[in-house]
Amino acid sequence: MSEEPITRTFLTFSLADESYAIDIHWVREVLAYQKVTRVPRAPDILSGVINIRGKVIPVIDLRQNLRLGESKTPGQSTSIIVLEINLEETLSMGIIVDDVHEVIEIENAQIQSTQNIRNFQDTMVVKEIAKEDDNLIMILDLEGLLDRDSLTVIAGYENESHRESGHLTGSTASV
């Protein structure tokens, strides 16, 4: 009896007609697109904020962040993927994508390092590339995509919304 192949689980989505994936452990939920409220004088990385069940969540437009062209006018398939990123405390944030496809398992043998293209990227955002049938799926490195400074700024917006609504207790972060 042979051993089962070792697999990893990803959420797949598209941006600018290309396939991308993120490790499922980052994903809290997937939402249909909703209006993003812009925040005055916010840094370029931040598209705005949304309200999810009473919690204000910062949102970035992944298409713009990856420099894949202008933001697409939100359509029926546009989604917001809500992520949970662990810093000193858990940060919830949304990323706008063109279309969410599915949760898939990919065998480790089908995943290749991007070591040979690292010199061509100004920041390392594509961690690995998966081969599925005739398609290539770029697996994003969220830690590379969102550097610590960006995460700190985004966390400041999330924490600020909690302080204003009285939900944050203990020490407060400064922006």
Image (cartoon, grey):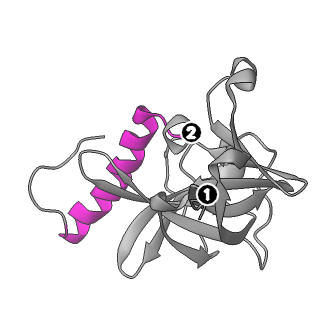
Q: Is 66 included in the stretch rendered in magenta?
A: no
- Where does the image place residue 50, in percent across and percent down from the top left? 49, 69
Compare residues 26 and 2 and report the one nearer the observer: 2
Q: Which residue of the protein is positioned furthest toward the left in this rendering?
A: 170
Q: Is residue 112 above or below residue 29?
A: above
The stretch in magenta equals 146-167
> Residue 73: which quarter of the image?
bottom right
Precedes in sequence: disc 2 or disc 1: 1
Q: Quadrant of the C terminus?
A: top left
CB atoms at circles 2 and 1 under 8 Å apart?
A: no
Residue 3 in view of the camera: yes
Label 2 residue SS: helix
- Where does the image place residue 58, in percent across and percent down from the top left? 46, 58
Pointer 1 residue = 5
Q: Is residue 95 left or right of residue 137?
A: left
Residue 121 in view of the camera: no
Q: Is residue 122 above or below residue 132?
A: above
Q: Is 148 included in the stretch rendered in magenta?
A: yes
Question: Residue 20 got which mark?
Answer: none
Density class for disc 2 (Cα within 10 Å; few <14, some 14-19, many ≥20) is some
Question: Residue 145 got which mark?
Answer: 2
- Amino acid type, residue under disc 2 in the picture: Leu
Residue at figure coordinates x 18%, y 63% from the top left: 168
**What is the chief secondary structure element of the magenta stretch?**
helix
Q: Which residue of the protein is positioned furthest toward the top in this rendering?
A: 119
Q: Is residue 90 above or below residue 145?
A: below
